[in-house]
Amino acid sequence: MLRYSIKRLMSLAISLAVASLVIFLVIEVAPGDPASYMLGINAQPDTVAALRAELGLDVSRPVRYLAWVGGMLSGDFGTSYTYRTPVAGMIGDRLWVSLPLALLALMLSTLIAFPAGIYAAARRGRPGDVSVMGATQLGIAVPNFWFAMMLVLIFAVDLRWFRAGGFAGWDKGFWVAMHSLTLPAISLALPQAAILTRVMRSALLDILGEDFMRTARAKGLSRRQTLWRHGVRNALIPVLTIIGLQFSFLLAGSIIIEQVFNLPGLGRLVFQSISSRDLIVVESVVMLLVFAVIVVNFLVDLAYAAVDPRLRART
Amino acid sequence: MSLLEITDLSMSICGLEILKRVSLNVGPGEIVAVTGESGSGKSMTALAVMQLLPDLARCCGAVRLDGTDLLAATEPELCAIRGRSVGMVFQEPTTALNPVRTIGDQVAETVLVHGAMRPEQARERARDVLDRVGLPADRFAMSRYPHELSGGQRQRVVIAMAIALQPKMLIADEPTTALDVTTQAQILDLLKGLVADYGMGLLMITHDLAVVADMADRIVVMRNGEVVESGATRDLLAGMRHPYTRMLFEASDHQVALPEPPAPQPLLQVRGAVRDYRLPRTKLFADPGHFRAVDDVSFALNRGERLGLVGESGCGKSTLTRAILGLEPVQSGQILLDGEPVFSGRRPNLSVRRKMQVVFQDPFGSFNPRHRVDRLITEPFHLLDTPPKGAARRDAIAAALSAVGLKPGDATRYIHEFSGGQRQRIAIARALIVRPELILFDEAVSALDVSVRARILDLLAELCRTYDLTYLFISHDLSVVRSVTDRVLVMQAGRIVEQGETRAVFDAPKHPYTRSLIAAAPRLPDLASLRRTPDHV
């Protein structure tokens, strides 16, 4: 298990290095000079040159790459071209909204999907299964911003249980902040839960047909005991894969929900900085997201090994 | 009184009759074998006793275990009976165990689920049972996982799970079919020992008459869901009143008449072939280890000769087959067909490759289900420079199908419309269509029922006469190899340990490994001697 973890950790480091290089190159290749963009079309060439020097754009690419990576490692992500504030601070603020939101949504989706998927698999073909499958069909088909608007209409406008949008801030207290993340998290979680339920169900159904499930029944376990003791853990591998993918999506892909609920999250930051060609922010946020995805993959790999002893042996 | 009494058991699934008035009894300490070909209902009979039938199955009749009618029992009652009063062992040990739980947990679970003991005691009992089935504590800790064990060892774990609570009745459904002959002999011994020690009744399902003849007290022969004949082993075999029983017995030991091979003239030459597989690195910068699957193998196959290759799983038979086909390179040595290497440069030598064809074991997995038969059997044409077209192609298809006993009209059908035996004929047609000089049969009859197998072997003999076939017949089944080969190679751990005339090797094996293989293979009893002494011994 230790050797397995070390190997995964090494592959994590390599992936990060490669990813940083790719991100840097892609953004370098993209047309448009941030300095002239910031100064407008009427700027004097020497003013532009001076700003390029100030921004550190005048040195060679390898040096800039190393400076960028080195800065990130020491927590310095550079200064935003547009806002003239440290990028680290900007991202930090947004992360405190996006990360809890993603975690909350993931938790909700797992809490819905596991029981629903197991329930549907255990009652395959019967009315319970059919209704769960119908609900997931709906969850996949309907876009999450529609859920978001419905939730706002019902719980914010009619019932007034929640605020329609905005983020209260963590300084007002944990529960107040969580309260303002609840509706966005639910709207993010519903479609994900629908997908996860289907994955859980089909993974379990595959397992139910395995020989060892019959062996378990021959030992005297009831259907339910067989399902819980031998089925669920074996079905977890594909489910974990999907959970990993969903987390990455939730972290960065929530821009529409952030827009609907007017939340200051990472998605909106990326959107704004792309439109204003604030490349240093884009670079940093993308790198951060890549880091998150790779770390999540690493955790999923560790979870695989915890679930399946055959992977631990294969070093 | 009988322990297990099955009386007039009928079972149907959606109106389709699977079992028809099956009756049989098993007494304490008695071994009763149910035998028959696939589709005879023998496994369904076993599952009916466990009441682990498919959801839509409907039973009538009576199945009594120690006086309790299992057909009338409720599901919770059945859960209390399964594992405690009756245990079951399955065919496929590689999939019968949960891969993510330790063997100790899985054996102890039988005890725990019945609430028979406290957890510590249950683990002690699991340890005892594992010891009893031949998995001692020093080599087989309770914390090991199924994937760390071999097939035979896993089957021992499955048996341990079944007998953990010392049930009165044990059901074994083809318990040794997936195992090598030497492992099979050990598992059969274990089962016999358990029956003797615990006084259990054993209901054993098997298609292999030789296994049955060797260990059963009584035999029940089934066909199409019906019992056609049953009786004490010796009486039944000596009498064989039903023609189906006679047919099974004869097909199991089917002998074919091969034509005399022509004068020796080498076709395939294998000289000092070595095939290494790289093992995963254990340390970052250390050299990765190698596993030598084929170790310095040399032999020659003459034109018109039928050569057998026998050995147990993992001995390197399949690796050698792939190397001969040029699918993989060898690390040293030479493989020449007609004097030309089968693998040249970094890929198979196509000019040699077209002279060889192969027939694989699985008649269900070796065809693309979306292609028609004509497309399937003409696949080898891509090896030719100028594949026949139009009428010539149709003629070739018709000739190949007729040669294997099918109709030319079958060319437009899909593979799912054919039975296992017919599919194997189509596989042979696919091999024949380019008139190869050499055909490799890789366990080509192992998945077939005995009667089907006998007919395929007849077909082989016939093709030998009409096409002067040269083939390499790879099998773990000694009796088949004995019947259809002139010469045989015995392979163990990557090496050829013995080779010679088939009859000579089988009658007077020289190498100890060959001797142990032949000793372990179950044999049909000699009918003449059975009939001479009809009384029980």
Image (cartoon, grey):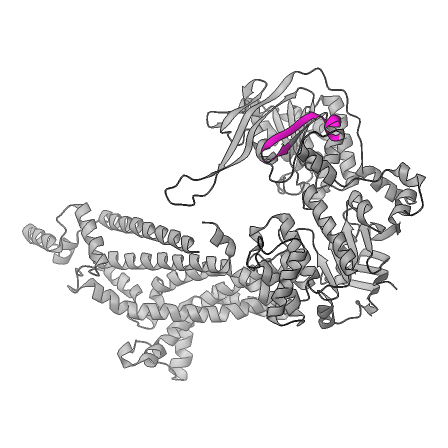
Q: Quadrant of the N terminus of chain A?
A: bottom left
Residue drawn 69% across the image and 33% down it? B514
Q: Residue B311: which quarter of the image?
A: top right
Q: Position of residue A112 (x, y in %)?
A: 49, 71
Residue B60 vs residue B108: left or right?
right
Q: Position of residue A198 (x, y in %)?
A: 53, 63
Vertically, is A88 above or below A261? Answer: above
Foreground pick, A226 / B281: B281
Residue drawn 35% across the image and 51% down it? A10
Q: How many marks?
A: 0
Vertically, is A272 above or below B151? Answer: below
Vertically, is A113 above or below B36? Answer: below
Foreground pick, A11 / B53: A11
Q: Is residue B491 visible?
A: yes
Vertically, is A9 above or below B287? Answer: below
Q: Position of residue A185 (x, y in %)?
A: 39, 72
Q: Position of residue B297 (x, y in %)?
A: 58, 27
Does the magenta-highlighted stretch encompass residue B494? yes
Q: Residue B19: which quarter of the image?
A: bottom right
Residue drawn 50% across the image and 34% down it? B276
Range covered by the magenta-colored residues = B491-506
Q: Is residue B394 visible?
A: no
Residue A314 vs residue A78: left or right?
right
Does the magenta-highlighted stretch encompass residue B275? no
Foreground pick, A103 / B521: B521
Q: Which residue sits furthest front?
A: B138
Q: Residue B482: which quarter of the image?
A: top right
Residue B267 vs residue A294: left or right?
right
Residue A71 vs residue B23: left or right?
left
